[in-house]
Image (spheres, rainbow, N blue to C red):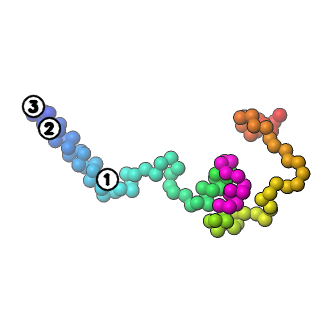
Amino acid sequence: MMMIGMAVVWVVLLALLVAGLTWLFPSAMSSRGPSGPAQDPMTIASARYAQGEITREQFQLMCRDLGAVEHMDDTPTSEPSGETQELPRTGEPFGKVLDR
């Protein structure tokens, strides 16, 4: 019976120690998730555009909204006149599509 009482005391002391450390150092104990440290909005927009999550027009609108003029170029946002060629969507890595 004495052994169980000592075990309970140690568990309570350990829990108090963890709670105290969490209270003293809240930023060290919290996780920011899989993205790591917070990034600025322009870096996030650039990454989303590079990954194809947003269109060129959406990216340029975000640049304008964020005041990041250096990321925008002077080319028009509409499609150029004439025919455009699209790459086939095969689900293969980009290099394999080009090797065909």
The residue under label 1 is which amino acid type?
Answer: Thr
Q: Position of residue 53 (x, y in %)?
A: 65, 48
Residue lying farthest to the left in this orientation: 2
Q: Is residue 56 magenta?
A: yes
Residue ID at (67%, 51%):
54
Question: What range of the chain is rendered magenta?
Answer: 51-62
Name the residue tied to disc 2: 6
The residue under label 3 is which amino acid type?
Answer: Met
Q: Position of residue 69 (x, y in %)?
A: 69, 67
Q: Could you say which is closer to the camera, residue 2 or residue 56? A: 56
Name the residue tied to disc 3: 1
Q: Earlier in the sequence, mark 1 or mark 2?
A: 2
Name the residue tied to disc 1: 22
| Secondary element at tag 3 | loop
Q: Position of residue 91 (x, y in %)?
A: 71, 35
Q: Relative to residue 1, is residue 26 depicted above or below?
A: below
